[in-house]
Image (cartoon, rainbow, N blue to C red):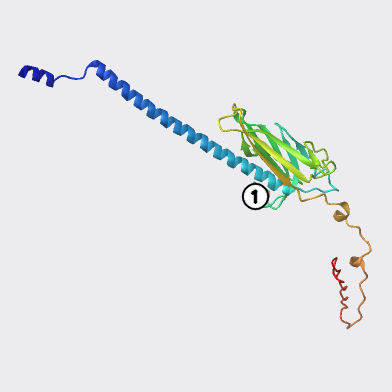
Amino acid sequence: MNAKRLRARFEAFTLVEAMLAVAILSLVVTAIYATWTAILRASKVGLEAAAQAQRSRMALQTLETAITSAQMSVLNAEYYGFIAQSGEDALLSFVAHLPPAFPRSGRFGDLAVRRLVFRVESGPENDRMLTLRQHPLVRELDEDEQNHPLILARGVRALQMAFWDMRTGDWTEEWLLTNQLPTLVRLTLRMNAPGGATSHQERTITRVVAIPSRGLPPPLQRPQVGAPGPANAPTPSLGPGQPPVIPAPTPVVPVPSPGTP
């Protein structure tokens, strides 16, 4: 009886029991690894989506700031042309009076009137990106700006543009009046959804921008010399010791509004 008890005390797990324990442990480790991988993948996709949303927002904000600052000169229309091409190889070029906070304004100093060139072009690893190049109106595009443009957004599929035509009262996808500024511009930025360029889904952002500026007419740019008016009125001659003659201001007659007795 004592021999049986001693033999039972030193008995270990069988080979089947050990293999079963190892299999259970492998399943637990695999489940933990799969859960951790899914968490990392979801975190990566979320970070990419947030970064893409921020880049697209900044890209459209830069476009909106530039378009609202657009200018046009009628006398020098060949230097102020508004050129637009929509689609996958979009191109948008115009002259604007830019604020000091505009990107890369520090490179140009006080030359606030610059030509902007927005373009959708190919980048590294077959990536499509929205770029911005700019140069002062009195200078050409330098080599550094040409080879190293400002990248506004990556993963761009297309930049669709539509322009409000005052004659037809409808949107048009082509702007052929290069010597005029459109009243409204509708921008649609199409970008790859998080997950790569092979994804069939895309992210679309649309914004309508109004251009407050209009072409400056030639009479305001080149005023006529000697035209009649108060500016060319003869100056009264003063005798010795006479005080200067200050003309009396012209009285302003208030115009009553409709319905005023």
Q: Amino acid at mark 1?
A: Gly
Q: Nearer the viewer, residue 54 or 35?
A: 35
One can see residue 141 in this view: no
Residue 87 lies in what quarter of the image? top right
Name the residue at the left extreme: 2
Q: Nearer the viewer, residue 242 or 20?
A: 20
Q: Position of residue 152 (x, y in %)?
A: 63, 40
One can see residue 194 in this view: yes
Q: Residue at x 45, y 31 (%)?
A: 38
Name the residue at the bottom extreme: 241
177 left or right, relative to 128: right
Rendered view: 128 above or below 164: above
Q: Which residue is mark 1?
A: 106
Q: Residues within 10 Å of mark 1 (few under 14, many from 20)?
A: few
Split into 4 quadrants, where in the image is the C terminus?
Answer: bottom right
Q: Residue at x 59, y 33 (%)?
A: 193
Q: Position of residue 56 (x, y in %)?
A: 62, 40
Q: Nearer the viewer, residue 178 or 170?
A: 170
Q: Position of residue 79 (x, y in %)?
A: 81, 44
Split into 4 quadrants, where in the image is the N terminus?
Answer: top left
Q: Secondary structure at mark 1?
A: helix
Q: Residue at x 9, y 17 (%)?
A: 4
Residue 151 lies in what quarter of the image? top right
Rendered view: 222 above or below 13: below
Q: Position of residue 109 (x, y in %)?
A: 68, 51
